[in-house]
Image (spheres, coloured by chain):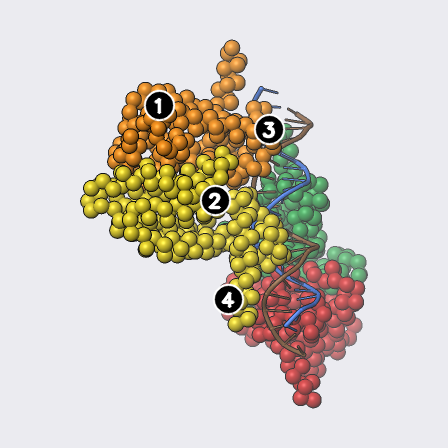
Chain colours: A green, B red, C orange, D yellow, E brown, F blue
Amino acid sequence: MKNEDLVQDKRREILDAAELVFTTRGFTAARMDDIADTAGVAKGTLYLYFSSKQELFVSLLEERTQEYVNTLSGWLEHAHSLSEFIHISVKLRGQLFVKNQRLAESMSHSVPDFPKDLQRRVWDLRRALEQPTKDALARLLPRDFPVAPPKVAAMVNGAIDYVVAGCIFHGEPVVLNDIAQDLEYVLLPGLSQG
Amino acid sequence: MKNEDLVQDKRREILDAAELVFTTRGFTAARMDDIADTAGVAKGTLYLYFSSKQELFVSLLEERTQEYVNTLSGWLEHAHSLSEFIHISVKLRGQLFVKNQRLAESMSHSVPDFPKDLQRRVWDLRRALEQPTKDALARLLPRDFPVAPPKVAAMVNGAIDYVVAGCIFHGEPVVLNDIAQDLEYVLLPGLSQG
Amino acid sequence: MKNEDLVQDKRREILDAAELVFTTRGFTAARMDDIADTAGVAKGTLYLYFSSKQELFVSLLEERTQEYVNTLSGWLEHAHSLSEFIHISVKLRGQLFVKNQRLAESMSHSVPDFPKDLQRRVWDLRRALEQPTKDALARLLPRDFPVAPPKVAAMVNGAIDYVVAGCIFHGEPVVLNDIAQDLEYVLLPGLSQG
Amino acid sequence: MKNEDLVQDKRREILDAAELVFTTRGFTAARMDDIADTAGVAKGTLYLYFSSKQELFVSLLEERTQEYVNTLSGWLEHAHSLSEFIHISVKLRGQLFVKNQRLAESMSHSVPDFPKDLQRRVWDLRRALEQPTKDALARLLPRDFPVAPPKVAAMVNGAIDYVVAGCIFHGEPVVLNDIAQDLEYVLLPGLSQG
DNA sequence: GATGAATGAGTTTTCATTCAT
DNA sequence: TATGAATGAAAACTCATTCAT
């Protein structure tokens, strides 16, 4: 028990360090040295937990995606209106925006060179990531809404991410409640049309 | 004249090659060898036109941003309704989506390590990139629209990019007319509210 | 006693494992991990019995050389003719060929880098290894044979080893009786000359 | 012309350095750094001429085997008796003994881990290496000699190599003429039997 | 101006050895 | 005594940059 817990702790420490370094520098520019230093372990230790830099990266994606998907679907289950859906989406995507964004970017560049088994693991992740939003929209949109739920999900998420990114870029504070209200104002009329 | 033109031609060839390689592999993973091969010149020649890999990258961003901003503001000047605005935006962002997306991603990862003078040049680019959409919205949105034009611009552009990215990811054809109609259906009611 | 025996057992297990790994991969490419796994003990345990990888290797050479020399001199003592000498030599060298060959090769590569005390131990081994064949030839060769026994020993052993190696390389079965007859046919006339 | 020659010179320098280092240390223990230092070039330069340490090793084997086979078959063509055959064999194998021996040893350990294409190249070498001696013996042995030429070749070569190795090991001078006479004395009677 | 061979600092990965339990 | 997680020095290989031709 004790032993197993310690192993999990160290694994988590390494993943936290990896997240920081990968999201700051991108996959290729990130150095295993930096990850080890950040985690406070020796370089060799990384390889006791992950078989390569690529495998560490994919494991990190899996871990974070899992957490995010769990949280998101938990919250969205209790959304009973499109307004609630928008507010919940803004709150969660906004909080996790920066690191998820950076990881996602790294993915599109780096993964094409990965070995087949790792590519497959990433592929599975992408599908898992879309599911909760798609499910909630399927439930909340008016019957016979002419735009398919996956496309609507893309619009909502894109709008959220870009507004948050804009705030960060311009150095404005990210007030998620205000952002949610702005989004509601723009999107709700269109999404509520019978 | 003749001489000057030749110089410009070679410069352009190198930039075209750099675009292909940077957008395919990302900044760090891109190799000067590949860029030279793709451009059909020797590696040393790259350094006659650009003083480093970083400077080549920033020059490319400047070149492409300039082109894109010129085209976009040209088209948006003639937009006389929000509907037209949406259709024009989808058409242009959609066409340029992939390469702009990749360049933008590379920017966020790589630029923080660049020397200060190059960072300044990138900073100026980002502002230039937002201007045309902001100007058009300021003109087309209803008086006293409660959401600021830069935020609306972010929502529209985010929605466009994510829908296009979703099509590409799922292997569906990217039919820009259809996408524009979907976006109009979702966004226009909110944007037209008095 | 009991305790002492257990210690010897574990030592032997480690040496057996080391033999398998060293002869399969060569000294440098052999990993202490593999030896520990093969022996069924933890890596740290190896260092309770042998102070380093190098010392383990030399101890193995000593152990195996001792066994081989004992067996060989026991058999050769009862050889009463050059024909018997050849048959016995083929039988024993043939059986032990592969592992001895590999250990010997490792020796010539690796030992030059060893510390002086280990080099000295290896040096002693080499001399011990030649003695039984030299003694038997001194007894069995005709009086005043013009070629010195050590050189004859080298010829016989070289001929045996290369024929066996040739069979192995070409994938032919190693039939030691046939090989002994071939060697007798070629060597006996010369060795029997008065 | 000039250019091509310079390239060949540098390639040769690297191969010479590689031979020295590989034969001194064995394949695994040899370091690319050492080879580069010995050749008087930078580490990166090695990779302009050979794509990996393994490929450098196999290229070296090919180069040296080719030289040796050419020389050997040239000389053996003019051997008109078994006595001449023995003298020629001793002279050539003796001269090249040390380095060929060491390279051959490295082969048996290292090559099994090489990629398939390199293994194939080594396999071809081994066959080429046996041909000249086999051809000469087929010509010179008595009709209906009961031992197959490849086996006789193995005996002769093994005897030569071990006698030479014995001299080196005991610190005696290697006088090839004397060694050839000793071998003739022992082997010729057996090989000449009708 | 143009070339491309050469460089060497920087990166990932391995593995003998140690030491707290 | 036995363990095996942790270490970090060392090795293969890469690639931006330079410079003699």
Tell if the residue under mark 2 belongs to the same chain as the one under mark 4: no
Kind of residue sitting beneath label 1: Arg
Q: Is residue B120 shown left or right of residue B83?
A: right
Q: Is residue F12 left or right of residue B51?
A: left
Mark 4 vs mark 1, foreground winner is 1
Q: Quadrant of the C terminus of chain D?
A: top left
**Residue position marked by numbered label 2 in the rendering:** D98
User: Is residue A190 in view?
Assistant: no
Cβ–Cβ under 8 Å for marks 2 and 3: no
Q: Chain of mark 4?
A: B
Amino acid of disc 3: Asp
User: Which disc number belongs to residue C117?
Assistant: 3
Where disc 2 sits, the SS reads helix
Whether the residues at callouts 4 and 3 have beta carbons within 8 Å, the answer is no
- Please name the residue that numbered disc 4 is placed on: B172
| Residue D46 drawn at (x, y percent) | 57, 57
Of residue A128 and residue C127, the one placed in the foreground of this image is C127
